[in-house]
């Protein structure tokens, strides 16, 4: 039997756990977490208006263990972005990151998605994410040099759905 927590659509009640996750996961500086909090609030308030944008979460006994945000690209032909992929440090290397990406891919395909893009920063702190994307069949398809600062590039990974 798998011990990967089940993944479901987020609700407003998930916000405190989500913020704990984002404070833990290393994706953001302490002063940046409020930006994702505002995005989450906006999604909760208007999610019926954008059904092709969705937050999803996985809970374990201690709270929210992982999350991701799937967003259709408005100006493209059936392209989706998977953003804010995060697994709490207590829950890593158990397959949840892989399951969260798989969940996003299924949801995008259900919406007739053709391509999935995942962006991340270069540098050692995202090495785990890059290894995960490569294992799931994502290819590095774009690089914006210095996007996140001197020597830190934006990397764009792509997979056909
Ligand atoms: C990247 C992240 C989501 C992976 O979550 P996870 O649940 O630990 O990943 P999984 O257990 O599903 O790993 C699946 C595979 O990815 C690769 N992988 C994951 N973490 C790795 C690591 N630290 N080093 C090397 N490979 C790694 C492995 O191939 C792994 O399979 P294996 O465990 O059988 O060897 C998690 O480390 C994380 O939240 N990191 C901080 C936030 C971040 O970088 N987010 C993505 C950028 S936007």
Image: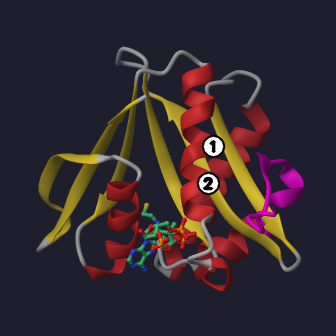
Corner quadrant of residue 134: bottom left
Q: Secondary structure at mark 2?
A: helix
Q: Are marks 2 and 1 in contact (CB under 8 Å)?
A: yes
Residue at the image point whose x is 85% and y is 80% from the top: 62
Q: Is residue 118 left or right of residue 23?
A: left
Q: Nearer the viewer, residue 2 or 64?
A: 2
State the image coordinates of residue 34 (x, y, percent, origin top left).
60, 66
Q: Relative to 17, is 11 above or below?
A: above
Q: Which residue bears the numbered disc 1? A: 103
Q: Which residues are magenta?
A: 1-17
Q: Which residue bears the numbered disc 2? A: 99
Residue at the image point whose x is 61% and y is 25% from the top: 52
Residue at the image point whose x is 44% and y is 38% from the top: 81
Corner quadrant of residue 1: bottom right
* Residue 10 lies in the magenta-colored region: yes
Q: Relative to 53, is 148 above or below?
A: below
Residue at the image point whose x is 63% and y is 31% from the top: 107
Q: Is residue 132 left or right of residue 37?
A: left
* Label 2 lies in ligand 1 vicinity (Cβ under 8 Å): yes
Q: How many marks?
A: 2
Q: Is residue 51 left or right of residue 81?
A: right
State the image coordinates of residue 10 (x, y, percent, origin top left).
78, 48
């Amino acid at each position: 039997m798998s011990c990967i927590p089940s993944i479901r659509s987020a609700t407003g009640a998930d916000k405190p756990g989500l913020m704990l996750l984002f404070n833990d996961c290393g994706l953001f500086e302490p002063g940046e977490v409020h930006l994702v909090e505002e995005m989450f609030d906006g999604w909760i308030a208007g999610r019926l208006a954008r059904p092709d944008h969705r937050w999803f979460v996985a809970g374990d006994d201690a709270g929210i263990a992982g999350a991701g945000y799937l967003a259709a690209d408005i100006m493209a032909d059936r392209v989706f972005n998977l953003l804010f992929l995060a697994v709490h440090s207590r829950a890593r290397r158990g397959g949840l990151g892989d399951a969260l990406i798989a969940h996003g891919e299924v949801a995008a395909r259900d919406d007739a998605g053709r391509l999935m893009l995942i962006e991340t920063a270069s540098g050692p702190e995202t090495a785990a994410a890059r290894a995960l994307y490569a294992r799931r069949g994502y290819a590095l398809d774009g690089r914006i040099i210095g996007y996140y600062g001197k020597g830190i590039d934006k990397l764009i990974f792509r997979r056909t759905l």
